[in-house]
Image (cartoon, helix red, strand yellow):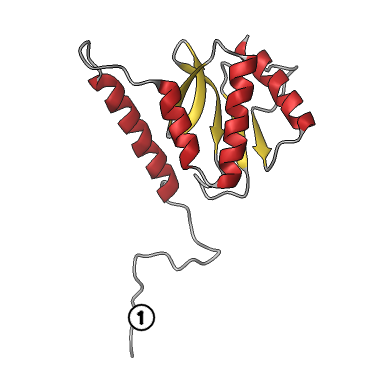
Amino acid sequence: MTSTQTSGKSSGTADEKYDGFTEEERGAMKERARELKAASRRGARTPKADPETEVLAKIAEMPDADRVLAERLHALVKAGAPDLAPKLWYGMPAYARNGKVVCFFQSAQKFKTRYATLGFSDLADLDEGTMWPTSYALTKLTPADETRIAALIRKAAN
């Protein structure tokens, strides 16, 4: 009689259970920890990093399809809600009021999904009745999409 041993590694079957964070989620948490550590290191004598420069650098690193979306969203936020400050949040471009994230862009590549996401936090004033969307899937931006997004961003910033 022979016995069969199985390794602790995933076999990739459909019956596989989710146990913990994905590699991408762990990466995002590590990026957030680096952001917080860098912010805490900035003392009175250390020159303060420009958050917009950091956001634009992160956008420039994205694959072409995501980069085009992120650049356009950045321009829409700057034009429609200039009081929202750009910042990195879990390694993603985000826009904040008083240091608290109001909206963010998540590239499709970040979590290996088929679409990018424009998301809004609970600080965004998007309430409509008892139910409303807080994130939007993006594959490309048409002029009509840009008009709708600009209106959402203005509303979220108020």
What's under tag 1, amino acid-wise? Thr
Q: Residue at x 65, y 15 (%)?
A: 80
Residue 115: % across, % down: 63, 45
Element type where label 1 sits in the image: loop
Residue at horizontal 69%, vertical 28%?
A: 133
Please count the marks in the image: 1
The residue at the far left in this view is 45
Taking the image as shown, residue 106 lies to the left or right of residue 136, namely left
- The residue carrying pointer 1 sits among few (fewer than 14), some (14 to 19) or many (20 or more) residues within 10 Å by Cα, namely few
Q: Is residue 1 left or right of residue 140?
A: left
User: Residue at 20% across / 13% down in the picture?
Assistant: 45
Is 6 situated above or below 71?
Answer: below
Residue at x-position 23% and y-position 17%: 46
Which quarter of the rendered picture does the N terminus lie within?
Answer: bottom left
The residue lying furthest to the bottom in this view is: 1
Classify residue 48 by image quadrant.
top left
Residue 36 image-quadrant placement: top left
Considering only vertical position in the picture, is 59 above or below 15?
above
Q: Is residue 21 above or below residue 136?
A: below
Expressed as whole percent of the image width and height from the top left, the position of residue 39 reads 30, 21
For the C terminus, the quadrant is top right
Q: In the rendered view, tell whether residue 44 sits above or below residue 2.
A: above
Q: Is residue 21 left or right of residue 107?
A: left
Expressed as whole percent of the image width and height from the top left, the position of residue 18 reads 47, 52
Question: On the image, numbered disc 1 is attached to which residue?
Answer: 4
Residue extending farthest to the right is: 144
Q: Nearer the viewer, residue 7 or 84?
A: 84
The spot of residue 156 in percent (x, y) is 63, 16
